[in-house]
Amino acid sequence: MAFELHEDVRVLVVSYDEHKRSQASFFDEGVDAEYEINRPRGTPNFHRWLLNEKFRRSIEKISDDLQGASVLTICGGSGLDAEFIATSGASVLCTDISIGAAKRAATRAARFGVQYEVAVADAEALPFPDRSFDFVYVHDGLHHLEQPIRGVAEMARVARQGICITEPARAAMTRISVLAGVSTDAEDAGNAVRRLREGDVRDALEAAGFSAKLARRYLMYYRHEPGLATRVLSPRYASAAGRAAFRLANALGGRVGNKLTIQAVRR
């Protein structure tokens, strides 16, 4: 596989169009590096709980299969996903289109003693052979792409056993949230937020020979950098109340929620 080294980070063959160049440039230099490397460490307890809860949900139906499995993360950012998955017992390659993000992911691994590899790669044109990883995983990354379903197809191509996708869902609740100014249709990086429809993702996976073990919407909201709400809910008793409220909200309205998780296995 052709690659070059950029300050000890493998850069696999990537062709940058205007959109990809803009994304890579923003995440190279436009974020708080220390926060990205360290999070969720140093964040309020309730914020950390939400991140862990989202990760738990993202592997709910395949968690037992991760022990000893090879896992590729795409749009992996500064390595948060890779760390979660590596601590679940998998052998992980963390990829992102940003060299800056890949460097931060490598720093995270070294700083906290987590074992995973890092490379720069394009999620819409993965530089790997068919079925070269047991699982392919993405968390809040496909919606950055110009063609999210192309990213799904690439995940399916290189996955031998299964796929885990957790992304913002195209939902009426989200439209209301956008109109209220709580959510947005564009991110700081300049990309439109391309929220996914469950049916579109299912169709792409089924066409590639996968069937869903779990496809579920649920409610999940927190700011990228913790806000007042997560701080207020972080003391012990407030946190218990916050968790109970979160579970109740999902029991009542999760099926129309703003987050989509799909875990699929090859037929």
Image (cartoon, grey):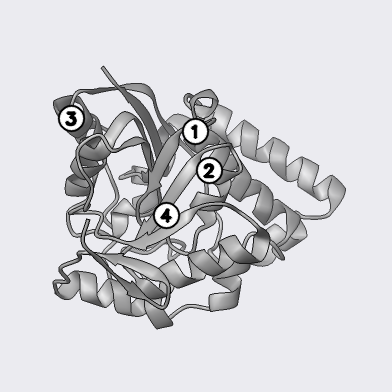
Foreground tag (4 vs 1): 4
Residue 73, relative to residue 77: is it above or below?
A: above
How far from the left and from the top, in percent, is residue 250?
55, 33
Q: Which amino acid does label 4 sit on?
A: Cys
Label 1 and label 2: CA atoms lie apart by 9 Å
* Residue 188 visible at all: no
Q: Is the C-beta separation of discs 4 and 2 under 8 Å?
A: no
Numbered label attached to residue 59: 1
Residue of label 3: 203
Mark 3: give few (<14), some (14-19) or many (20+) Cα within 10 Å.
some
Which element is circle 3 on?
A: helix
Mark 2: give few (<14), some (14-19) or many (20+) Cα within 10 Å.
many
Q: Residue furthest top?
A: 267
Q: In this view, does 82 lie to the left or right of 4?
A: right
Label 4 and label 2: CA atoms lie apart by 10 Å
Q: Residue at x 42, y 38 (%)?
A: 70
Numbered label attached to residue 85: 2
Residue of label 4: 94
Which element is circle 4 on?
A: strand
Instruction: Answer with the quarter of the image where residue 157 lies.
Output: top left
Q: In this view, does 99 lie to the left or right of 208?
A: right
Q: Which amino acid does label 2 sit on?
A: Ile
Q: Which residue is drawn at 17% across and 71% down?
A: 16
Foreground tag (1 vs 3): 1
